Every structure is written in C-alpha cells, then in structure tokens.
Image: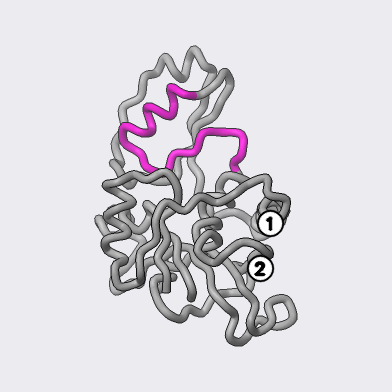
Amino acid sequence: MTAAGVTPLDHTILSGHFPLAKAPLVLGNEGAGVVEEGGGTDFPVGSCVMFTGPYGVFEDGAYSEWLAVRKESLCLIPEGIDDVSAAGIPVAYLTARLRADIVIDGVGGEVLSEALGALVLDGSLTTLGYAASRTATINVTNLIWQRASIKSFILFAQPQAAWAEAWNTIVALLQSGAIKPIVARTFPLAETADALRYLVEGRPFGRVVVTV
C-alpha cells in the first residue's frame, strides 16, 4: 500500500450503522499500491495499481502497509497520475461512470433533500450512503414538478463487465486530461482517525487520502 482513500463509508461503519461489517476490521475501501507478487501478466511485479471492492467492509481494507487484493479489483494507474490522487479515484469515479446521468448523494440526511431540489427536469437522485443520517425529509413537490426519481446504488453489486467498462472509461479520461482528481488534504497512516474526522466535520472539497 502507498495510499488509501478516506470515504464516508468508513464513518458509517465506525458509527455502527452498517451492521454487515463486523469487528475486528481494518477500514479503507479504496487505495493505491505497488504489486509485490501474484499479479501475473496483467499486473506484473512493480506495477502501480488502484483498487476498490469489499475491502474495509467485509474484509480487512486499505488502512495498512500490505493488502492482498483480487486481480479483478485492480486497475493500472495511468502514467502521470500519482499514487495519492489515484487512491481517491476508484469509489467516486466508478460510481459516477456507472450512474453518470444523475445527482449522487453519499451523505444522506439533509444533503439528500438539498440534492433532490437541485435536479433538472426528469433528473434522478441516486443515494448510496448515509454518513450524515439514515433519516431524510424530502419536499415531494421536487419529485412531482421535476418529474424526478430516487434510486439506490451499491457499487459492490455491479457485474464485473460493468466494472471493466467503467475502469476503461476512467483511465481514458485521466490520460486525456479530461478529468483531474482533486485531493483536499493528506494524512499519514498514524493519523487516520484525524483524516476521517476531517472528512466528516470539515466536509472538504476534494478527496482525503491517507499516505502509507
């Protein structure tokens, strides 16, 4: 591991609001690193890779110095993208590609109702997290007059073909410079608790990343 993204899901698990995640558990749902062994021809030893998957949720995750990651979870980091930026790419960018025609809310609570009000005509709100609250109050006129819809989304549940297509699209956009990851702040691994606190309380513009 060289870097790990800090996500609202980490806070949700720590708060006891994701009962499927069982302690003891090393958190960290996304990250970047260097292949040490077992990558085969697709990911030779020394390859710089980024990943997400069940790590930090159903099994130990990226807040560690070493992690065994399935090959289907990996993507080679494009040339010109540093590990810190790459560590914060997978969750947000894969979600955006797999559900790109909508407003995506990963916080819940009041943010969900605000996001619903921001939709264009025939827009769709996808909710995939509830770090702020599992309860939200919505104005139904935003649904009716905007002809809007609300859907849920779970990244882990998407078929492998959809993951592969999304990865390919993201890599092409990164290589062309069409998208540029924004990192708000980095923290060393020993200060992971501070990193999570900063994400939740500071609500920064950009990703928070832990460096290993």
Q: Position of residue 140 (x, y in %)?
A: 39, 18
Q: Is residue 105 left or right of residue 108?
A: right
Q: Amino acid at mark 2?
A: Leu
Quadrant of the snapshot with the C terminus? bottom left
What residue lies at 40% left-to-right and 46% top-to-bottom? 129
Are circles 2 and 1 on residues that touch, CB within 8 Å?
yes
Q: Which residue is mark 1?
A: 171
Q: Which residue is mark 2?
A: 76
Q: Position of residue 61 (x, y in %)?
A: 42, 71
For the question of whether residue 59 can be seen, the reply is no
State which tag comes first along the sequence, 2 or 1: 2
Q: Tell me which segment is drawn in magenta.
A: 99-118
What residue lies at 55% left-to-right and 51% top-to-bottom? 181
Colour mapping used in the image: one colour
Does the stretch in magenta take in 197? no
Q: For numbered disc 1, what is the local secondary structure? A: helix
